Amino acid sequence: MGYGKQNLSLDDGCVQKGVIIHELLHAVGFWHEQSRADRNDHVTILWRNIQSGSIMHYGPYSFSKYKTSPTILPKEEGVSIGQRFGFSEKVSGLSIA
């Protein structure tokens, strides 16, 4: 990982607090949760519902062939994934300018 200046470009449709935080976390070295080594301990990937050629996941219906069939499901009931508009208690208390 390099150290130094990194530009962040956001399309007009991406100028939302959750998307900005998501992209800034990438800039400082965070990876997507579904890339974690222990991913399968926490979510189930529904490969049969994934559109051919998809390389990233965000929400439970991202990249779905049918838009009503989930592609990833949390194993723990009541857990949300892919949210960009509401945050967990750990994040919601942070001051975001």
Image: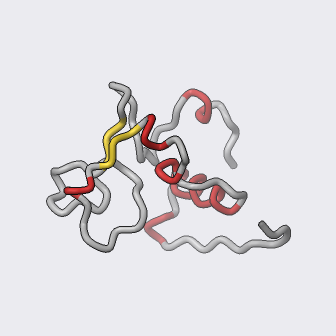
> Residue 26 location in percent, x, y?
63, 60
Query: Against 64, is 37 above or below?
Result: above
Quadrant of the snapshot with the N terminus: bottom right
Seen from the viewer's position, the closer of residues 44 and 77 is 44
Residue at the (23%, 48%) spot, across then down: 70
Q: Residue 58's quadrant in the figure?
A: bottom left
Residue at the (71%, 74%) spot, across then down: 7
> Residue 74 location in percent, x, y?
36, 36
Q: Residue 64's quadrant in the figure?
A: bottom left
In this rendering, position of residue 43 left or right of residue 87: left
Query: Against 11, is 38 above or below?
Result: above
Residue at the (21%, 56%) spot, across then down: 49
In this rendering, position of residue 17 left or right of residue 93: left
The type of colouring in the image is: secondary structure
- Residue farthest along the right direction in this orientation: 4
Residue at the (52%, 41%) spot, across then down: 38
> Residue 4 location in percent, x, y?
85, 70
Seen from the viewer's position, the closer of residues 53 and 95 is 53
Query: Against 79, is 32 above or below?
Result: below
> Residue 94 location in percent, x, y?
68, 36
> Could you tell me how many numbered marks the image carries?
0
In this rendering, position of residue 34 left or right of residue 28: left
